[in-house]
Amino acid sequence: MSPAIPLLLAIGLGLAGWLVARARAWTFKRAAPDGRIAALPSYHAWYAALWIVVPLILWFLIWNGISGQLVLNYVLASPEAQSLPEFGLRRDSILIEARNIAEGNAGLGMNDEAAALAEPFREAMQRYSLIGLVVGLLIGGAGAAWAFLRLKPDFAARTKVERLVLAGLLIASLVAILTTFGILVTLVYETILFFGKVSPADFLFGIQWNPDPMSTGAVEGDRYGAIPLFWGTLFIGAIIAMIVAIPLGMMSAIYLTQYAPARVRSWVKPALEILAGVPTVVYGYFAALTIAPAIRDIALALGASNPSSESALAAGLVMGVMIIPFVSSMADDSIAAVPQAMRDGSLAMGATTNETIRRVLVPAALPGIVGGVMLAISRAIGETMIVVMAASTAANLSANPLESMTTVTVQIVALLTGEGSFDHPATLAAFALGFVLFMVTLALNFIALRVVKRFREAYE
Amino acid sequence: MSNAQAPTRTAAFEARLKKRYAAERRFKAIGLSAIIFSIIVLLFLLATMTVNGIGGFQRAELRVDIDFPDMGLSLPPGEMEFNDAVQRLSGQGLREVVQFSAEQTLGAEGAEHVNGEAWRLVAEEIHADPSILQGEASFWLPTSEDLASAYAEDGQLALQPLAQDLAERDLLADNFDVGFLTRADATDPQLVGIWGALKGSILTMFVTLLLAFPIGVCAALYLEEYAPKNRWTDIIEVSINNLAAVPSIIFGLLGMAVFLTIFPSYRSAPLIGGMTLALMTMPVIVISGRNAIKAVPPSIRDGALAVGASPVQVVFHHVLPLALPGILTGTIIGMARALGETAPLLLIGMRAFVATPPSGLTDNATVLPMQIFLWSDEIDRGFVERTSAAIIVLLIFLLLMNGLAIYLRNRFEKKW
Amino acid sequence: MVMQDTADTPIAEMAQSNASAEAIEPTERKMRAKGVSVYYGDKKAIDNVDIDVYQEFVTAFIGPSGCGKSTFLRALNRMNDTIPSARVTGTIELDGDDIYASGMDVVQLRARVGMVFQKPNPFPKSIYDNIAYGPKIHGLAEGKAELDAIVEKSLRRAGLWEEVKDRLQDSGTALSGGQQQRLCIARAIAVDPEVILMDEPCSALDPIATAKIEELIDDLRGNYAIVIVTHSMQQAARVSQRTAFFHLGNLVEYGHTSDIFTNPTQQRTQDYITGRYG
């Protein structure tokens, strides 16, 4: 059944209910001695419409969830299904194909069984969508009846409607909690499964990272030492990238806020915003195609032996450039939050602009700047595409920026886009890495946001 | 008077002053160079992409003259489905006709390098205008991958003289490739297009917007206007602020573990991609929405309350309309971010090879940034240019969205 | 000087009881403004003002809010330079040198003409570092001992030493409002300026703190030329020797404080000090 049908049904019934209820409210209003009723007719209308539409949509959502299984049961009970292979891929693919044929998405397929099964599928789908529609109509009718029985001249329809609106708003705001909760539960669950196979100590303190997604049999814990990944992540995201981003971002912000004429600012700020809006996949491509070979060539020319073409330096530098606008806007905000009186006070004593900036404004803005840098680090270590495209997948514990290194995010992608099955330790390791990444960025963000908030309050 | 020994009027003071001014100039110069460096990097990036990308909008094509009446092809007039027409023409030997005519025009060596799928292009044109079957017509048809790279003075050296020769005879040229914007992914860089990925992006963004915007606005309204100050509200706030800063790949893990478990058959469908990105975009909308709502002065609420409006009416009749431009600005920026996002979609499997544009929310699809990522893995020179061209298209979309956001901000921003 | 009950005492009497108000004749002219106008963009905020500021005198600028007195004060040490649209015409001289001339260095000028602001604005640093800031940037102290001495001397002169000597490393922002303002005055005198400009230094303070600041101004008068902008006529009458009355960007009247408050020559001055407007 196309999702458009229940949607149209819900809208149609709702509209009908809305119109009828409004007409009814108008008759109340005309009949009322002073021409007044407890709520405007439109609220009566909304009350009825909501009572029709909400249950209807809930019903169709539920039905959509369970009817697939019902259809399948029906098909499996049919005589044509008796010839299906017992289990395995082939059985599944036949069923999927049969469904596709029945839905008209595919012509005749590869399996003859599928063609035979298409008929029962079609029957089952027709049957269950009819049931769904009929029940849906009944539910909509029941909702309508309930609503219409309550419409009276003195019925406070507005309060009821508003209460429902508020409930809707509350539910919307709970989605955020649900998401956070979902992330935590998913990551914790998979991580616990992973730690059932590889000990946490091996994972957190081991220095060999060499998982084999295709391996079978005994799990080798010593292949899952994540220290080289943590080091690569920190080296690229928190060291190389920050060496680029912090000075450039800070100085850009200082120049823009303290020195640049308004006209320059009005051009440069949007340009920096563009730099911030470039998708990371573009930076990654830029790093892999242009920067990484250039760095390797330069390193070769300078006499480095065997520099990697997937060097940590290339990924880190480009990531740093990506973070510049972020650091710049955080520093900009923080410096702007320092009251003008501080600046005036310093200038009035005969300080030059740079003395004022370095000795008064930056120290005063420091908490905000530090918070901004922490957010920037959290962004850099969670950044995926640049490192996936420009850094390596080979784990390497080294302090030489010209060597190839890998990061947590690279490994998550590598492990989850490979061929490993869902309960293989290599797959689970990706979730454990994700859990570590989540906790670290969560801590950074949490502290940073607190610091920034307290800093803002200090000057308000 | 004390002036004589005033420390601020000594020669030493003035000497120090010179140094201080030098420091000032240095500092200013450092600031300026930081800005200039950032701008140069931006320009360098854009220039690299443009230079490479211009080639991506073109492809090497060979001219083939076909004399149709000679070949005895016919297409019955009247309405006909494209697939039927192709089938029918193929049945009449169009493929061989094209091959034969190519040999006539280009010589045997050149004809070998007419792209194997080129005859479909001819069929397409015949379908669009059957009257060309009445006479002679010349077509620009894509070359093989090898000849294209030889023409670009790359690839096989042995082919370069042939390419040069054909080019001198005006039989080989780089032509603007309109089809790049209308085709989908392919294995041959001569035949790829971005419409498939672009459509996937559009469908995905549609789902994202449909979910994230209403939820985001409602949550922002609740938190800003109605939420009591208690621990629950604090938890909601903290989780929204943190979600806005959580690495996007984490959302991919969530989408993979939750959405793909619930809908296993919709792997790499825009529906799942859109849902995953919606979770990521929603906090951005909430935060910008709250700022916009906060900016509506309390006097407006007081005024409405004073004439007897209920709190819900105050918000929906007065606060929301006034805050809407700000909310929309934030939404567009959040959507632009989602449009450029790749990492979470990588995990939920939107990296499929999609040769036909998706026609619905549950079809296999890929998105524009993912297409860029997939092409960037190809070593062929043709793909390098195509990748840059796709990047240009993506950047144009993002620029338009950001431009719209900036326009909205400037047009409707009110100083209360 | 003793704080009087200002509510009952007529200002004129107060001005006369301020013994120093007319008795001494000025010894040295420190600053002189001639034909000074200040513009913000196209708007003229100050129109053609002539004023002399004398060494060892307190000069008060009074007038209703928005009359331009603060704007004029900020022109005296070129703090208006920090506002891009501000423009000053006419001449302002410090010891006979035009401060807007190209040879005048604005950093040196501001070191010589210190300023105290309306709201106390200590830097978010320790008390010690607040005072040491000026001497440090100007390189006025050689070594820690000399710096310590400057800090102690400045705090003593600002009458703050006894209150803070045990907690010099505490943050300057942790002090009370009145203490913060005296800290700012100490900070200004630490670089040994010749003129101190005060922009309504007491408007954010309670009466007791105000009394202390006024006492301090009177103490400091001996070593500096002081210019104070004030909202309160009583304050002007209590602390100043010369008073200038500004109205709508014009200097209406300038003279001995006692004259301004006892027999002003201009009707507008008369109206203002008797409370007809303002």
Image: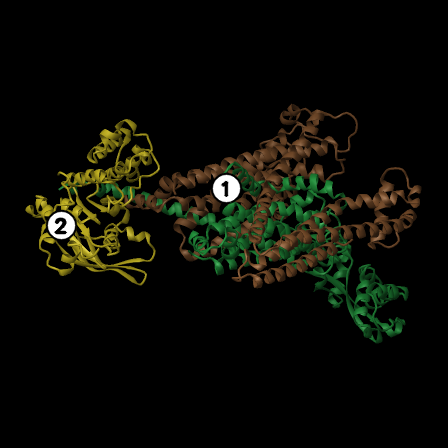
Q: Which amino acid does label 2 sit on?
A: Arg
**Quarter location, residue A48:** bottom right
Q: Quadrant of the C terminus of chain B?
A: bottom left
Judging from the image, mark 2 belongs to the subunit labelled C
Kindly indicate which chain is depicted in yellow in the rendered structure: C
On the image, numbered disc 1 is attached to which residue?
Answer: B228
Task: Give the residue at the far front of this rendering.
Answer: A33
Q: Which residue lies at the image location 63% right of the left edge and 41% below the top edge?
A: A387
Q: Quadrant of the N terminus of chain B?
A: top left
In the rendered picture, chain B carries what hue?
Answer: green
Q: Which of marks 1 and 2 is in front?
A: 1
**Quarter location, residue C218:** top left
Q: Do the residues labelled 1 and 2 touch (CB within 8 Å)?
A: no
Kindly indicate which chain is depicted in brown in the rendered structure: A
Spot occupied by residue B260 in the image (x, y as percentages of width and height) = 72, 42
Secondary structure beneath label 1: loop
Judging from the image, mark 1 belongs to the subunit labelled B
> Alpha-carbon distance for marks 1 and 2?
58 Å
Indicate whether B183 appears above or below C172.
below
Tag on residue A180? Answer: none
Spot occupied by residue B134 in the image (x, y as percentages of width and height) = 84, 76
Q: Nearer the viewer, residue B151 or C29?
A: C29
Q: Which amino acid does label 1 sit on?
A: Pro
Viewer can see residue A31? yes
Q: Is residue B283 left or right of residue A371?
A: right
Viewer can see residue B387? no
Tag on residue C242? Answer: 2
Label 2, residues with CA under 10 Å away: few <14, some 14-19, many ≥20: many
Secondary structure beneath label 2: strand
